[in-house]
Image: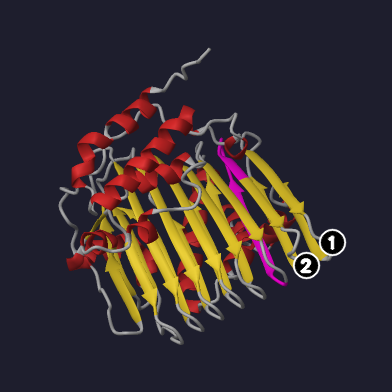
């Protein structure tokens, strides 16, 4: 007997809307076939829910009652001054800047580069010019991850960043994804980052909004990263969209031999955010350092889920994530480290720490180790606690007001993760953003 699986209203709408959208999506027949195949995977999977192990703490099917229409791209473009204003501290350091407004490339606001050392292009233009569809639109996990499948089906644009071999960039590549539409819409973007052998670069992804943009939104973003042999990449993401929307992000990273990959996530002020990372060691003697800070309050929900796959020997992985939760906020950390049978001499450490500033907030932590080799050094841990009242008292006894004392202590707590960002100007910008948010939140809490 065949049992029909009931689709939710949102799942039906996401599947049915493709027919009317397909003709507007970039790429030729090969892209259309790949997109249709990805949509078929989504149709078979449906939106993930709490009975799916990887999503047990973030019930997306329940959160997405409605499917919002795709962004039309017809919102008025902001001025360069407005972009700088919403970027705040992220606009203070020199960068190769590329801007996307509601999921579409904005050339007048961008500083595209093609100087032989670094080439930054629009994904839509690359696909229209006959780029390799499989390279740009295919993604590992489309068959088992509904969010990845939706991204492959609906991706409208994104940044394609190529760094030549043996190049050291003197300034970061800043990819700005800006929400401007006053209507509640969905944006779907795909970024490609490829770092040549023995090169060094910093890539910063910023998700921000213009004043007047809709409070409700959906964002589905995916970044594919390939770090060449002996190359070093610092990869930073700041999710600061502000609103009651849903932000879904996936990073798929492959490392060649002796590569060094440092990644950092800052998430604040988003209704529901899920940052998912899949890191695969494809070459020996590579290193990763993953870190992040998430700050949530007023019922916000932030989920960090990562899988580090030690598929080859003699690689090192480090993960440190710190969160601050207040009011009815909820934080989730799921970190799985897989050590394959042949991955001897693996060295892996993982830690998640959270400050819980209210008895009504919740933190769900699920660290996992799957070890199939016998010559490894691996460990993980997780802690949660409130602010130490003795430290608060100490600060106040030195004349520091309560709101400022709390903010300073929280800032010190998250600062350990922010300090892992190696480039000083980027690190300072992230620290300024976190500091401003924390001091404002602390002042509001004390006033209440």
- Position of 428 with respect to 104 (left or right) is right
Q: Which residues are magenta?
A: 314-332
Task: Give the residue at x 44% y 42%.
Answer: 147
Residue 315 inside the magenta-drawn segment: yes
* Secondary structure beneath label 1: loop
Give residue 372's position: percent from left, percent from top.
78, 55
Task: Give the residue at x 44% y 84%.
Answer: 165
* Secondary structure beneath label 2: loop
Residue picked out by circle 1? 374
Count the numbered circles shown: 2
Residue picked out by circle 2? 344
Of label 2 and label 1, which has the lower sequence position?
2
Give residue 24's position: percent from left, percent from top.
19, 46
Can residue 174 be seen in the rendering of this structure?
yes
Give residue 119's position: percent from left, percent from top.
32, 76
Around disc 1, counting alpha carbons within 10 Å, would you say few (fewer than 14), some (14 to 19), or many (20 or more)? some
* Closer-to-camera residue (302/132): 132
**Are the residues at dot 2 and dot 1 in contact (C-beta closer than 8 Å)?**
yes
Q: Is residue 427 above or below residue 222?
A: below
The image quadrant that residue 313 belongs to is bottom right
Task: Give the residue at x 58% y 56%.
Answer: 401
Give residue 354's position: percent from left, percent from top.
66, 50
* Closer-to-camera residue (425/130): 130
Q: Real-space Cα distance between discs 2 and 1?
A: 7 Å
């Amino acid at each position: 007997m065949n049992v029909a699986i009931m689709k939710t209203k949102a799942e039906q709408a996401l599947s049915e809307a493709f027919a009317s959208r397909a003709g507007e999506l970039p790429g030729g027949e090969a892209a259309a076939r790949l997109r249709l195949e990805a949509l078929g995977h989504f149709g078979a999977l449906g939106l993930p829910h709490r009975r799916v192990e990887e999503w047990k703490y973030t019930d997306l099917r329940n959160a997405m009652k409605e499917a919002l229409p795709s962004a039309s791209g017809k919102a008025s473009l902001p001025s360069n001054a407005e972009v700088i204003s919403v970027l705040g501290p992220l606009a203070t350091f020199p960068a190769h800047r590329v801007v996307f407004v509601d999921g579409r490339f904005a050339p007048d606001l961008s500083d595209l580069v093609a100087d032989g050392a670094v080439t930054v292009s629009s994904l839509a233009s690359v696909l229209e010019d006959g780029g390799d569809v499989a390279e740009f639109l295919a993604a590992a996990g489309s068959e088992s991850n509904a969010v990845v499948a939706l991204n492959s089906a609906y991706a409208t644009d994104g940044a394609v960043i190529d760094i030549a071999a043996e190049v050291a960039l003197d300034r970061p590549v800043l990819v700005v994804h800006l929400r401007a539409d006053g209507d509640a819409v969905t944006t779907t973007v795909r970024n490609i980052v490829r770092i040549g052998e023995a090169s060094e670069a910093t890539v910063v992804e910023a998700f921000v909004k213009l004043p007047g943009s809709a409070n409700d939104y959906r964002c589905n973003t995916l970044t594919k990263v390939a770090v060449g042999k002996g190359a070093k990449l610092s990869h930073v993401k700041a999710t600061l969209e502000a609103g009651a929307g849903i932000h879904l992000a996936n990073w798929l990273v492959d490392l060649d031999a002796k590569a060094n990959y440092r990644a950092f996530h800052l998430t604040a002020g988003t209704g529901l955010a899920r940052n998912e990372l899949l890191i695969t060691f494809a070459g020996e003697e590579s290193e990763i350092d993953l870190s992040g800070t998430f700050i949530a309050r007023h019922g916000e929900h932030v989920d960090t889920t990562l899988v580090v796959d030690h598929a080859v020997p003699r690689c090192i992985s480090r993960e440190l994530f710190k969160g601050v939760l207040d009011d009815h906020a909820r934080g989730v950390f799921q970190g799985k480290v897989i050590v394959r049978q042949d991955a001897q001499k693996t060295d892996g450490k993982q830690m998640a720490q959270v400050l819980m500033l209210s008895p009504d907030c919740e933190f769900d932590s699920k660290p996992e180790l799957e070890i199939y080799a016998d010559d490894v050094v691996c460990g993980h841990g997780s802690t949660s606690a409130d602010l130490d009242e003795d430290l608060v008292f100490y600060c106040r006894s030195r004349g520091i007001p309560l709101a400022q004392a709390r903010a300073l202590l929280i800032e010190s707590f998250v600062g350990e993760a922010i300090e892992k960002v190696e480039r000083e100007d980027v690190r300072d910008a992230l620290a300024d953003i976190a500091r401003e948010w924390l001091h404002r939140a602390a002042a509001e809490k004390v006033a209440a």
